[in-house]
Image: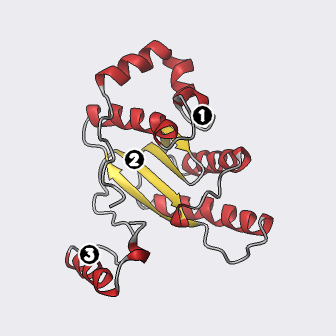
Amino acid sequence: MYDYSKLTLEERRAIIQDRAARGFPAHAPPHPIRDERFYLLTAACYQHVHHMRAPERRQQVQTALFEQFTLHGIAITAWVILPNHYHLLVHVSDFAALSHIFRAVHGPTSRAWNQADAQLGRRVWFTFADRAIRSERHYATTCNYIHYNPVKHGYAQSPYDWAESSVHWYAATHGQEWLRSTWRAHPINNYGAGWDD
């Protein structure tokens, strides 16, 4: 996905034709499954630029996400906010509300950060992607994936070192031993491999 700009015109056309044949939008993630209860939602900064390098910006996004999801009656059950993307595990009651929520979070943060960085008109966010959660095992593995993400991307040595993560809520609520047993029972292995291809 992030190497699209490096492809030849012919390669780009082939990708767009394939997406059109499958009924997908030309340049945005498709949302073909809209009737499940739980989803992994991912939103990234445009071209994965580190617009949220400062903890204050990550906390700003985290606060805005909780406000908007709560306003729409959608529960966030796990989360992590990183310098250039974030993951949410959510219990969705109305899939159509997601686009409104992301616009309500991404629009104001884009404007504020562009003003602060003197970069008016810069594109900050890419649209969101979703993955339906298929089972309890998939749910548990997704939680582990979310909590391990700061380590996976080299931002922290331990999931507990990253502030903008639900790992702290789970540790306070269930205890670190519970988290360790969940990790052993539901390892992430190659979870997410190939998603960016």
CA separation in Å, label 2 and label 1: 19 Å
Figure quadrant of the C terminus: bottom left
Residue 19 badge: 3
Residue found at the very far left of the displayed protein: 21
Q: Amino acid at mark 3?
A: Arg
Residue 40 badge: 2
For marks 2 and 1 on the same chain, the one whose residue lies earlier in the sequence: 2
CA separation in Å, label 3 and label 1: 37 Å
Identify the element where label 3 is drawn. Answer: helix
Tell me, yes or no, if residue 27 can be seen here. no
Tell me, yes or no, if residue 110 can be seen here. yes
Q: Is residue 20 above or below residue 95?
A: below
| Image location of residue 7, percent across then percent down | 36, 77
Q: Amino acid at mark 1?
A: Trp
Verify CB contact (< 8 Å) between mark 2 and mark 3.
no
Please name the residue that numbered disc 1 is placed on. 162
